[in-house]
């Protein structure tokens, strides 16, 4: 089992920045990648970004050039630096872990709320 705990959400104004963090514990060796998803109010969960154990990154087009995902392997932590935030970035943000065996996002955090006011 892998446990993921997010932190760093909050309320900001448009144009401001926010940093989310996710710390993993448990069977860390089973993780192939860690990522962030978000669920805007009344919408389905959507992909934001992910980073592999080797540092390769992928971003959704909607956040490219504004968000940066990074990882600290020593702390088993993944960060999401969000700049130039827009009201449409308002959502519950979830950390997720992709496992090596299933190649699926098998583990999820509890979510953290990000609200961007206009």
Image (cartoon, grey):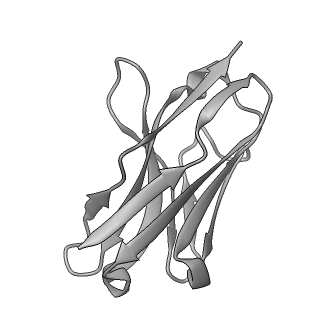
| Image coordinates for residue 81, horizontal then vertical, percent | 69, 51
- In the picture, measured across the screen, residue 50 lies left or right of residue 85, that is left
* Left-right relation of 92 to 90: left
Horizontal and vertical percent position of residue 114: 56, 32
**Furthest residue to the left?**
102
At horizontal 75% and vertical 22% (from top left) the residue drawn is 14
Residue 34's place in the image compared with 116, above or below, is: below
Query: In this image, 45 relative to 77: left or right?
Result: left
Quarter of the image with the N terminus in it:
bottom left
Q: Please name whichever residue, 92 or 103, is drawn nearer the observer in this view of the structure.
A: 92
Q: What is the x, y in percent for residue 75?
A: 58, 78
Position of residue 55 measured from the top left corner of the image (x, y, whole percent): 59, 77
Looking at the image, is 65 positioned above or below residue 5?
A: above
The quarter of the displayed image where residue 44 is located: top left
Q: Quadrant of residue 111?
A: top left
Q: Does residue 20 appear to the left or right of 50 in the view shown? A: right
Please identify the quadrant where the C terminus is shown.
top right
Q: Count up the numbered dots.
A: 0
Q: Is residue 3 above or below residue 65?
A: below
- Give the residue displayed 43% in from the left and 70% down from the top: 24
Question: In the displayed image of the protein, which residue is found farthest to the top?
Answer: 118
């Amino acid at each position: 089992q892998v446990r993921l705990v997010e932190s760093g959400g909050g309320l900001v104004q448009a144009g401001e920045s926010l940093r989310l963090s996710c710390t993993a514990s448990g069977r860390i060796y089973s993780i192939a990648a860690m990522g962030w998803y978000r669920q805007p109010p009344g919408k389905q969960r959507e992909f934001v970004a992910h980073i592999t154990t080797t540092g390769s990154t992928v971003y959704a087009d909607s956040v490219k050039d504004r968000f940066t995902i990074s990882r600290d392997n020593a702390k088993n932590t993944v960060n999401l630096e969000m700049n130039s935030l827009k009201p449409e970035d308002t959502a519950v943000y979830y950390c997720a872990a992709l496992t090596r065996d299933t190649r699926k996002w098998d583990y999820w955090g509890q979510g953290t709320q990000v609200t961007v006011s206009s």
